[in-house]
Amino acid sequence: MRFAVSLLSVLGVASVIGTVLKQNEQYENYIIKFGQFWFGLFEKLGLYDVYHSGWFLLILLFLVVSTSLCIYRNTPSMLKEWRTFKEHATEKSLNAFSHQETYSTQAAPDELKQKLTQFLAAKGFQFKFRAQEDGSELIAAKAGTHQRWGYIFTHVAMVVILFGGLLDGNLPFKIQEMLGYKRIETLDIPESQVPPESRLSILNPSFRANMTLPEGVSDNVAFVRVRDGYLVQELPFRIALKDFRIEHYATGQPKSFESDLVIMDPDLKEPITKTISVNHPLTYKGIAIYQSDFQDGGTKLNFKVWNLFTPNTETQSLDGAIFQNGVLGTGDDALKVEFNDFRKFNIINMSPDGKGKPHNVGPNVTYKLRDNRGQAKEYVNYMQPMQIDGKHYFLSGMRETVQDEFRYLRIPVDSDLSLNGFMNFRATLLDASKYQEIAQRIALNSLDVKKEPAVKKQFEASIVQLLSIFAKSGYSGVAQIIEKSVPEKEREAVARTYIRMINVAAFEAYNISLAANNKPLLASNADTEALLRDSLNAFSDIFFFGTPYYLQLEQFDHKEASGLQLTKSPGQKWVYLGSVLLVLGIFSMMYIRERRIWLSIRPNRQQVHFAMASNRKNLDFEKEFNLYREQLRSLIG
Amino acid sequence: MNNNSLEYQQKTLLQSLRWQDWLYAIIVFAGSIFAYTKYAQYMDIYETVFLFGAAALASYLGWQWKGLGKLVLAVGIISLFSISLYQGDQARATQAFLLKFLISSQSAIMWMNVLFVLAMAVYWFALYKRSDFSGKFASALTWGAVLFGFVGLMVRWYESYLIAPDVGHIPISNLYEVFILFCLITALLYLHYEQKLNTRQLGGFVLLVINAAVGFILWYTFDRQAHNIQPLVPALQSYWMKIHVPANFVGYGAFSLAAMVAAAYLLASKGVLTSRLPGLDVLDDLMYKSIAVGFAFFTIATILGAMWAAEAWGGYWSWDPKETWALIVWLNYAAWLHLRMVKGLRGPLLAWWALIGLLVTTFAFLGVNMFLSGLHSYGTL
């Protein structure tokens, strides 16, 4: 037993590891987190999937064996205790009891015997008589000895539960893997090319596999994730997904995920059609099919592609679909576009303090841009402008690795809630031929400079120069120039002047772009100031956007895929049986109290001796003993 | 001889029932039939069974423990009265006088908080002054807190349906709601033993842990607006929630009670407050009893959870952090009971263990949600 208890402790500690260290993540994440050395060590120890590692299974196995031994050793004595009345107790041993009382009586032995047995029966005791050599008679009684079954039940329950658990574990695969019959597939190859040693046949008695079915597609294999690879689980039937639906509450949170499935099997006269949802799986041929998650099923997308660094507003159209690739640009600069995910609903809490209600901000698309050296940056673009602090922006996030947070380019909307205003403004700012015009307009409005031609000229030249620096690298370029050419003391003042100049120039540039598009001009007010500030920030940020291409999502044809989980678990009924035994065992162990009473009628001494014992001494027992002692006194006396 | 035998003959439960007890059971069942006629459309077969099962359980417990019977009736009457004041309009919670200040779900829960704080103060005062009257008053305050808490939950249940019929659900679905449940169950368990073992001196100790939960509820309400009723995520839309969660909280409540008794035990065994607290044997017995109850219910809750998981997540056991920590809690108290029942161990070691066990339990209950991620992620802070 000590061994079993220490095993349980080890099990507890091992379990803690599995909760602290996130299990079954992508192996790259572990490498980044721990570094190569620790990653390798932890991998050897199986810490990324503790609960399926060899040593963990070994502990469980030991636990089964040691508990079984415990049961084997102790059950006979438990059964004996359960059955026996302990009628062979000697007077000497009874006299040594801590709970006893002797009554003197004149009553006849037969009368006493009748009274006492009635008393015992009323208290729910079973009893047995035994004549002693000295002419006295011993009544040995017991109650609550079923408690002993509690011990047997709880321990058998543990074995049964662990046995069921092992049935559903991956022990068969582990053994086959060790013997070299099976191996996990780690390459991302089409399912049909996965070799037989990485496939599990339909005869596999227990598995937990996943499959992703796009709408209108059917399949008869599922995938079992193992460590950093997978196995292909073949199914004895084919599943088709007719439709996947997400329903939402009025607040936007998801209310239900449902899949309309069709099961096709030659054994069936007609295919089974059934809708599954979370908490409502479908079981067919011993395989339970669960609604587990969902993802995109290859949504078709259409983008308007802007080149952020050209001084014009020409766009090109790009078609694509999730899980497919496209190309932007040509030659060495060509970028591969990998469309990764599309989400129609995004419930986000946009309030700055996090206290507001989350709401739907509309569709977004996630894609990667990969250059010909294989380097990729990941982007997430929202289709509709988002409201932040009362103003609307188009958001596009960029990150270089999955560990990073997305950094967002926030493009302010124009008066039509569209991107065009910013894009026209951007083109104007990039167009060096417009700088002179901008500079002249500013000079015209400036009382100090417009009178003196020389000053005016110099002033205009400096604005043109400032604009060309800003157009090349944004605020950071301006900052660099200041750092290089201005003494430290004056930097702040110069910077302030430059920023003011840039803002004034932006006002003119924006109006030039508006005029060119026959739009009403900006007035000088606070809204305009905010718009210009946001536009300049966005302009300055495109130099950190990592790519010249801005993909504006124009249209989509939504196609979803349902994530199904398929399990076959023959151990489940064993686990449930064990659970029932466990509950029965625990209740009988704790709430059935074993008590024994010995009443010895000693006619030759005109005495009745009362002794009482319990295998657990506690307050209830004390109370009961005191009660019986007094009741017996009045009964006998 | 017949007279003699009558003296020691123990009455069975049914024999000991008076007409009031039968009336009580009839009212409870009439109430559940009323609820059934009103809400049958929202219930599946399991939930119907639970409704009448709950009525049977309330009858049985009310027969065994008359105080609980009175509580059930009072909760029923006040909740119905409160619901009638709503007139089907949620806005009336802040308009109708009685609702706004007394028995709307939010107000009732606030009253619960206030009464628990008061009860703790009075319990400690009673312990300090050795005042029997104050002790009784503290018990009454605790009963009052429990009454308001249950009314708050019942009315919240109704309120959730006022938001929208598809939002309606039993209020034990998030951290805010189960914290209230925790307070109520812990308090009820304590009141039960207080009456049975006459241990009014322990009230101050037990209310410490309850008021810690009250503090959390207040912070959660005012800082995080957690009292707003949220619709259920798909995984929680199941009848299993109605049995899994309460069973779990009987476990958590009983373990917390045991830990507080253990604290009292440790103080008393060191000579602190010894003359004011119950005897060490009584404390030891109470600690054992409450761990036993907790363990039994925690086992059932974990098994129910496994069965639910088999239906919702595709497997009865996924080594989700919450499941794993439930196992650790279970192993911890299994070892405790093992030492006491099989090895016959007693004394401060077990008390320390029960006290530290509360840390493990708290981590399983709260820490997992705060620090670890997993399938039980609907209870985040």
Image (cartoon, helix red, strand yellow):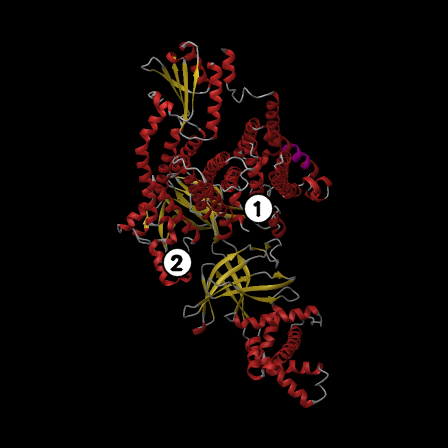
Q: Are marks 1 and 2 on the same chain?
A: no
Q: Position of residue A508 (x, y in %)?
A: 66, 77
Q: Amino acid at mark 1?
A: Ala
Residue A482 left/right relative to A370? right
Q: In front: A69, or A627? A: A627
Main SS category, magenta section = helix
Residue A518 position in % (x across, y down): 67, 72
Q: Is residue B12 left or right of residue B136?
A: left
Q: Residues within 10 Å of mark 1 (few under 14, many from 20)?
A: few
In the image, residue B88 lies in the stretch drawn in magenta: no
Q: Which residue in the structure is indicated by mark 2?
A: A27
Q: Can you identify the residue that label 1 sits on?
A: B212
Q: Chain of mark 1?
A: B
Q: Nearer the viewer, residue A152 or A382?
A: A152
Q: Which residues are magenta?
A: B75-82
Q: Chain of mark 2?
A: A
In the figure, residue B75 lies in which quadrant?
A: top right
Residue B49's place in the image compared with A427, above or below, is above
Q: Position of residue A87 (x, y in %)?
A: 34, 20
**Residue occupying image coordinates x 53% and y 48%:** B378
Above or below, B81 against A498 in this view is above
Q: Give me the residue at 59% from left, 74% from top.
A: A427
In what quadrant of the picture does the N terminus of chain A appear? Answer: top left
